[in-house]
Amino acid sequence: MLGIFSWGGTESSQEQKHIRNAIHNIPNYLEGENEDPIDLQVKSLTYVFKRLKADRWGPFLQADESNGYGYSMKVDNTLSSGNYGNDKLDVIYNIKRFEEKLFTDEHRILIDFPKNKMRSLLILSDNTDSSIIPSLGKENFQFHVLKPNGSDEEYYSVLIEKSNIYEEHQVSYRTKSSILGSAIRYLDGMKPRDEFTKDDRAWIIRQYVNKLAIHVQTQRIYRESKRQASPSKSRPVSRPTSPTKDRVLPIPITQSRVPDPKSLLRDQTQSPQERPLSPQKERPLSPQKQRPLSPKKDRPFSTFKDIPKSPAKENAQLVIPSPLSKTSSVRQSTANSDISNSSQEDDIYEQSALAVRIRLDKERKFIKSFKFANQN
């Protein structure tokens, strides 16, 4: 199947025949019930992957006003490269539509999002006609099959263990399974598993990728905020008792100014145009009280409630001392210090999470205005 992509820029009889056959099957890269036929998905995503060098995309998009989206793909040119495809095949495989799909998603500003969005699109809803899934030649970019009515084990296996989504970052299995499990449970409360549609499946995958992207970006800002705190006096800090690498115990910051997480995110992913923003608070979703929404639209979903609490807060215990016990007094002082540090850590984390939410809301408004301008 992949041999059809091996030609260069000259028009051979094989290429002309392929163009005539493919012109009637232009991919739209939609998800859910309106997705392209499976075989067309495989062909088009294979072409896009190789044409745009998806495995070499940088962690952030590159500011670029020339294409109208404000960003373009940033490719690592230090790796060996070669031209692949041509302008005619770009039209046949609707490269512009694929780029539009990535560039009009507000999550585009988050670290490694385009690369991992690509990985999520490689998860097919069914087998190909030949039941043979081709290889892209890259170990961390592979096609997988996940049917809508798959079991919990199948969803967890494909999305967490096989898809390589956000493998660039050390996110604990606990966090990944919590994010995925919340999305699955939401739909499980609405309908039986055997009634899950392609729209339901697409919504679960989208929630998993988006929430994981937000978590990774929040962790990035959170760690940098703590690193820049630089306290003037050093005090002993308790070691974490949890093996998770998602969050670490805080550095005491009572005598130092905490850097503004919003400025950190702004430095990392500066938008081509600065736009005013009125931040809005997100409310956690209560599936029992809210009316079910169609998975075709992004539904409210608790973004940060699924992230594990800090090890210090989970394990700190207040020890009530005996009036005559010096050891008890030391233990109480240590416990109170841990609680104070945990509270400061939570404050930094909440500021980091808020900075990401504000930046996403800002990007969402910009994209909306961009689409509106193009329609007129």
Image (spheres, grey):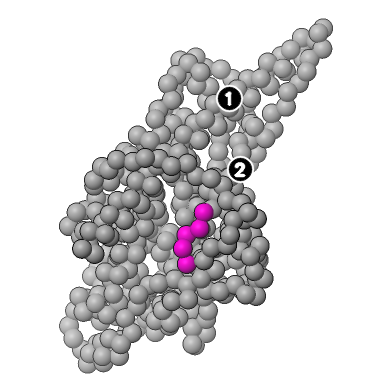
Secondary structure mainly formed by the magenta segment: loop
Residue annotated with mark 2: 308
Q: Name the residue: 63% across, 20% down.
A: 337
- Residue 313 drawn above or below residue 245: above
Q: Secondary structure at mark 2?
A: loop
In the picture, measured across the screen, residue 302 lies left or right of residue 105, that is right
- Residue 178 in percent (x, y) is at 61, 52
Q: Please tell me which of labels 2 and 1 falls first in the chain.
A: 2
Magenta residues, start to end: 296-300
Magenta region includes residue 297: yes
Extreme-top residue of the structure: 324
Residue annotated with mark 1: 341
Between the C-alphas of marks 2 and 1, the distance is 17 Å
Q: Name the residue: 33% across, 41% down.
A: 277
In the picture, measured across the screen, residue 38 lies left or right of residue 53, that is right
- Residue 251 in percent (x, y) is at 52, 25
